[in-house]
């Protein structure tokens, strides 16, 4: 066992570090974010600066590491992507603006779009000139996304889209989206879907921010009202949309578990600096016991990730680490947020950044952390994934199995 | 990055697993449970012939001089097989105590016999319910004679010698004490896990040789337990993974309301949680193995982390395995009880979870002070 790089890995790491050193600032603490340093935190400004930075990456060959070079990528190996991710995490950099497009939309275009379309759309996506989003979920189709209701009706060489998509990150600054809709309600739900890409500036597209528990708006609902698109924007065959969705989700690498917020180090520090009966709280055995549990989880995740990187380095396919990371990480984040508030005793309810420890990070995380247990696969779906794909256990029988979409029972809730 | 056992180490794992599946079926534990206390005697001889007891012992003392990683591999397999043997007492504790603190004479006296299995050693610290502290310690040595009672001592009736924590004047110190003579009264006590037998040892002016310097008892024990904790943790993870396998097998083959109970999310999610606990513990054990094999400064932290998460994982997997089996899991006939019993034996053998949690946070506090 050793934690060192192979010679080629070390060379790549040196090259990555050199570029990052030249173009970005090292974090002064692990939770430092790029956006927090900006005077103007409006999304227009964030997107403008993120685009500038992306262009620099592109020009120097650090954009879309996993893409082929002809479309602006670097054709990097899986291990090189890991190394880049490890190094990049040490710097304050714009994050998240391009991930969905480059991580999910790009690879799916490469698989299903024509050469001309790829030549038109992929380089601007790599450069950051055009931003893409993903439009799958609906108010009544979350974990059961194949139960979606947006309709796609064919009209000559065109399709007409009607319905509402939800939880679309960044739709308000995106140019294009990949979308799946129901083209035939008279077949079982998985068989009646068709996949497209759309220009979000098309007439009939209405983007509305969703106000969250936290009071801010990170997501949107996107309403399609008779939006007409060309049949050339169809990806995959008519009725084969589910297959394309599955291929897209295979590429999903949005790591929700890494959302900012207090983790073990922060709660450990809080326990050292917050009094409990005239002594630092950390001297209390019950507090130590809780901290030890979170440390074991934090370390366990870290070393599980190292085992998977190690497998990658040997050229093997990594296992279900992402599901474990998100399942454990999200629950832990919520527990830590609650405990941090609790340690502050009656002041645990105070949300003013100037008045309570850690700029009220624990209180903010209390409101934010429920999202982490839902977004990108709920706790329950992740347990199903582990049970089915790792342990080989069967699926629950489905009540809608042999029904056409039209016949599937629905409830009163959204 | 290579955070994985080597091909040679995995070959050793395959050999160990094959050997134990042929020679150490659960039937062996069951025979002991039903009163045949000698059922595993030949297993000890067979393991000795493979050289496992001498894994960590240098060749000059009759061992095979492999590293800590090889012993971790064997420990995980011994844990999977629920091997009924004094391996943990003799190899992870007595042998390691001699390697850490023994003088040349003591090493020459005992290590070759430990290596070939002709002698069994154990470690005696407890003096009844609750943990022993410098303040509570009663066993005492004057002029190389030990008097007092240790209880419970794992493998106390089977061992040829024990490393005993006792005080000399007021200073806690470790002693090497042969157990065969008339100055040591040995009485077997009933163990929750009879495959890990326990004893009361009463010493009356028993010959005791100091192991290490006077007053170094707790410091050496701490270091020894940090090392042993990682081997114990590998055994715990091994046991947890097999209990999980059994639970999955049963859930796939047991039908209720017309379908396999493994298709109910209530069961699937439980099994997924068991898998997650065992996986995190296994990864923490890997880090412990690395720290052990390199004598890393963070050994104490790595040991406590592996220990606490492996305790949790085996506890969860053993009890939820019974739960998954329903009423059948509570029967004598099913093997669920073997994992449930072993989980408890491994959990308390080196001190309870509260103490290890405390050590874990203590190690982090020290690290924090070093950084500050």
Image (cartoon, rainbow, N blue to C red):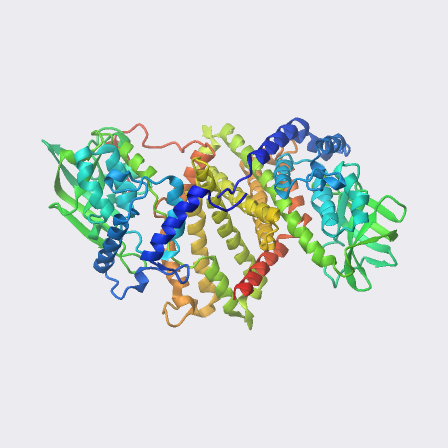
Query: Which of the pair A25/B345 is nearer the observer?
Result: A25
Query: Which of the pair B99/B198 is nearer the observer?
Result: B99
Q: Please indicate whether residue B93 sits to the left or right of residue B251 in the image.
A: right
Query: Which of the pair A185/B123 is nearer the observer?
Result: B123
Hey, which quadrant is residue A350 in on the image?
bottom left
Hey, which quadrant is residue A333 in on the image?
bottom left
Whether residue B131 is visible here, answered yes or no, is: no
Q: Please indicate whether residue B274 sits to the left or right of residue B202 in the image.
A: left
Residue found at the very far right of the displayed protein: B182
Whether residue A410 is visible here, answered yes or no, is: yes
Residue found at the very far left of the displayed protein: A156
Image position, residue A267 (x, y; %): 47, 61
Image position, residue B102 (x, y; %): 77, 50
Image position of A208 with respect to B55: above or below: below
Q: Please indicate whether residue A296 sits to the left or right of residue B41 in the image.
A: left
- Number of callouts in the render? 0
Query: Which of the pair A72/A251 is nearer the observer?
Result: A72
Q: Residue at (76%, 36%) from the top-left corner? A: B116
Image position, residue A246 (x, y; %): 31, 35
Image position, residue A412 (x, y; %): 27, 44
Q: Please indicate whether residue A209 sits to the left or right of residue B95 in the image.
A: left
């Amino acid at each position: 066992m050793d934690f060192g790089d192979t010679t080629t890995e070390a060379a790549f790491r040196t090259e990555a570090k050199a570029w990052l050193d030249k173009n970005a600032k090292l974090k002064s603490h692990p939770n430092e974010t790029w956006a927090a340093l900006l005077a103007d935190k409006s999304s227009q400004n964030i997107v403008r600066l993120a685009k500038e930075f992306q262009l620099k990456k592109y020009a120097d060959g650090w954009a879309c590491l996993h893409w082929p070079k002809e479309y602006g990528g670097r054709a990097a190996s899986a291990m090189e992507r890991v190394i880049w991710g490890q190094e990049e995490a040490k710097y304050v950099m714009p994050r998240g603006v391009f991930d969905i497009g480059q991580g999910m939309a790009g690879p799916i275009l490469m698989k299903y779009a024509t050469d001309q379309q790829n030549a038109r759309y992929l380089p601007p996506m790599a450069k950051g000139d055009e931003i893409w989003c993903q439009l799958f979920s609906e108010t009544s189709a979350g974990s059961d996304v194949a139960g979606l209701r947006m309709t796609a009706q064919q009209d000559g060489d065109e399709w007409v889209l009607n319905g509402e998509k939800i939880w679309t990150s960044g739709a308000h600054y995106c140019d294009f989206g990949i979308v799946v809709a129901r083209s035939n309600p008279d077949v079982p739900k998985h068989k009646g879907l068709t996949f497209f890409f759309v220009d979000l500036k098309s007439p009939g597209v209405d983007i509305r921010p969703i106000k969250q528990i936290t009071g801010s708006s990170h997501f949107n609902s996107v309403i399609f009202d008779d939006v007409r698109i060309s049949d050339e924007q169809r990806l995959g065959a008519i009725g084969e949309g589910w297959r394309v969705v599955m291929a897209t989700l295979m590429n999903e690498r949005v790591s929700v578990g890494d959302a900012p917020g207090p983790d073990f180090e922060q709660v450990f520090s809080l326990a050292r600096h917050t009094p409990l009966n005239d002594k630092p709280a950390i001297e209390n055995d019950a507090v130590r016991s809780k901290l030890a549990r979170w440390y074991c989880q934090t370390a366990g995740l870290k070393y599980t990730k190292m085992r998977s990187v190690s497998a990658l380095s040997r050229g093997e396919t990594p296992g279900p680490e992402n599901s474990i990371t998100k399942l454990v990480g999200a629950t832990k984040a919520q527990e830590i947020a609650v405990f941090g508030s609790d340690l502050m005793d009656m002041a645990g309810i105070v949300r003013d950044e100037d008045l309570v420890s850690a700029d009220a990070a624990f209180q903010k995380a209390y409101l934010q952390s429920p999202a982490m247990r839902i977004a990108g696969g709920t706790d329950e779906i992740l347990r199903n994934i582990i049970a089915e794909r790792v342990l080989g256990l069967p699926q629950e029988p489905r009540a809608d199995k042999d029904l056409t979409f039209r016949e599937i029972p629905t409830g009163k809730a959204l | 990055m290579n955070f994985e056992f080597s091909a040679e180490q995995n070959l050793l794992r395959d050999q160990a697993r094959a050997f134990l599946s042929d020679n150490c079926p659960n039937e062996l534990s069951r025979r002991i449970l039903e009163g045949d206390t000698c059922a595993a005697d030949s297993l000890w001889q067979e393991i000795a012939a493979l050289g496992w007891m001498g894994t960590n012992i240098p060749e000059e003392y009759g061992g095979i001089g492999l590293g800590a990683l090889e012993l971790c591999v064997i420990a995980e397999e011994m844990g999977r097989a629920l091997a009924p043997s004094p391996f943990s007492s003799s190899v992870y504790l007595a042998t390691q105590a001699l390697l850490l603190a023994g003088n040349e004479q003591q090493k020459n006296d005992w290590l070759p016999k430990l290596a070939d299995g002709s002698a069994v050693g154990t470690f005696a610290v407890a003096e009844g319910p609750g943990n022993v502290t410098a303040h509570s310690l009663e066993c005492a040595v004057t002029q190389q004679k030990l008097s007092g009672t240790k209880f419970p001592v794992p493998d106390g009736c089977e061992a040829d010698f024990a490393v005993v924590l006792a005080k000399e004047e007021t200073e806690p110190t470790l002693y090497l004490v042969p157990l065969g003579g008339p100055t040591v009264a040995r009485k077997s006590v009933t163990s929750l896990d009879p495959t890990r037998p326990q004893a009361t040892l009463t010493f009356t002016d028993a010959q005791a040789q100091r192991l290490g310097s006077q007053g170094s008892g707790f410091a050496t024990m701490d270091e020894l337990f940090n090392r042993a904790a990682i081997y114990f943790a590998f055994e715990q993870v091994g046991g947890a993974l097999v209990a999980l396998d059994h639970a999955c097998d049963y859930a796939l083959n047991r039908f209720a309301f017309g379908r396999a109970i493994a298709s109910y999310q209530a069961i699937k999610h439980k099994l997924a949680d068991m898998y997650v606990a065992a996986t995190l513990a296994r990864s923490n054990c890997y880090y412990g193995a690395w720290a052990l094999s390199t004598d890393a400064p963070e050994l104490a932290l790595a040991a406590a982390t592996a220990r606490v998460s492996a305790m949790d994982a085996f506890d969860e997997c053993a009890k939820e395995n019974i739960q998954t089996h329903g009423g059948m899991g509570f029967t004598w006939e099913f093997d669920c009880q073997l994992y449930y019993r072993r989980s408890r034996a491994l959990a308390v053998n080196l001190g309870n979870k509260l103490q290890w949690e405390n050590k874990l946070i203590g190690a982090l506090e020290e690290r924090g002070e070093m950084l500050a």
